[in-house]
Amino acid sequence: MGGVTVETKDTKVILDYRGAVGLLNTFVNAFNADNVQRGRSILKDKVGKPIVDTNISIYDDGTLEGGLNSSISDGEGVRTEKTCLVKDGILKGFIYDIYTAKKENSNKNTDDDIKSTANGFRGSYAGTPSVSPPSNIIFDFKEQVDISEIENGFLATDVLGAHTANPISGDFSVEANNAFLIENGEISKPVKKAMISGNIFQALSDCNGVKSELRQYGSFLIPKILFNNLRVVG
C-alpha cells in the first residue's frame, strides 16, 4: 500500500536472506568440480586468484553443529569436513566427490593430491553419487555495515526469476519482491514494481555483509547482503 515507482539507476541494493540465496545458488554452482572440469564454470583456472570482495571468506562445513545439512559422511562414506573455498576473496578450491577428485589428479601435472571434499551424494538409491551442492555453506564477512549508514539505496526481501540466471556467466535479471527504498539510513517507502539486474560474480566483488542475524536458508548461512552497485530498473 502506498507504493511508489523508482527511476532506473545503479544503486546500493540490500538483499534479504531469501533474495540473496536465490542469486547465490548460481554463484556456488561454479564451485562444483564437475562443472569446472567440463568447462562450465567461470572459475576454471582461477585458483589462487581474487574472485570476490577481499572481506569475504566462504566455507563448506558438513560438520557444523546444528547445520541443516550436517552429517557424519557423504553418500560415498567419505567423512565430512570443513572445506575452505574462498579466503579473503581468493579462490582456494572446489568441491569434489571421489570420481571428480580422481579425474582431477589424472589430469594435472603436480604432486598435490586432490581428495574428495565429502560432497558426493545421490539423488535417489537408483542413481550413482555425484558432486552435490555444498552442505552448509558459510559466507563470513569481515566488514559489515548498518542500514543507518546507507543514505540512498534499495531493499528487496525476495526476488523472482533467480533460476533464469546464466549459470556460466552469472548474468541475471530478476523481479524484486516486497521491495522498499532506503532513504537517510531508514527503510522508507514501499516500491510498486522493479527489476534488479547485474552479474553475480561482479556483484560479489563489491559487497558487504549487513549487520543482521546470521541465518541458514537451504545450504546457506548468511547475513543480509549489501551489493554496492546493482542496476535497479523502474
Image: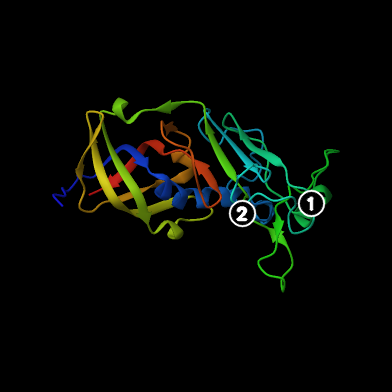
Q: Kindly report which numbered mark, 1 or 2, lies closer to the viewer in this rendering.
A: 1
Residue type indicated by callout 2:
Pro
75 left or right of 192 in image: right
Residue designated by label 1: 78
Residue at x 29%, y 27% (from the top left corner): 148
Q: Is residue 197 or residue 148 the one in the foreground?
A: 148
Residue 222 position, x and y percent, is 49, 40
Measuring 60% from the left and 45% from the top, which residue is drawn there?
Answer: 66
- Could you say which is closer to the camera, residue 151 or residue 231? 151
Say which residue appears at 56% left-offset and 31% top-offset: 89
Cβ–Cβ below 8 Å for labels 1 and 2?
no
Q: Earlier in the sequence, mark 1 or mark 2?
A: 1
Q: How dense is the environment of label 2, judged by Cα within 10 Å: few (below 14), some, or many (20 and up)?
A: some
For label 1, the crowd category at 10 Å Cα-Cα, with few meaning under 14, some 14 to 19 and many 20 or more, is: some
- Element under disc 2: loop
Q: Amino acid at mark 1?
A: Val
Give x and y (percent) for residue 176.
Answer: 31, 52
Name the quadrant containing residue 186. Answer: top left
Could you say where residue 177 lies in the image, as x and y percent from the top left? 31, 53
Which quadrant holds residue 45?
Answer: top right
Q: Check the image and report above or below for 187 versus 72.
A: above
Mark sitting on residue 10 = none
Which secondary structure lies at badge 1?
A: loop
The answer to which of 232 and 176 lies nearer the viewer is 176
Residue 57 is left or right of residue 125, and the answer is left
Q: Which mark is residue 133?
A: 2
Instruction: Measure the alpha-carbon separation of dots 1 and 2.
Output: 16 Å
Residue 209 sits above or below residue 45 on the image: above
Q: Residue furthest bottom?
A: 126
Residue at the front extreme of this rendering:
66
- How many labels were placed on the picture? 2
Task: From the viewer's perspective, tell me whether residue 178 is left or right of residue 18.
Answer: left
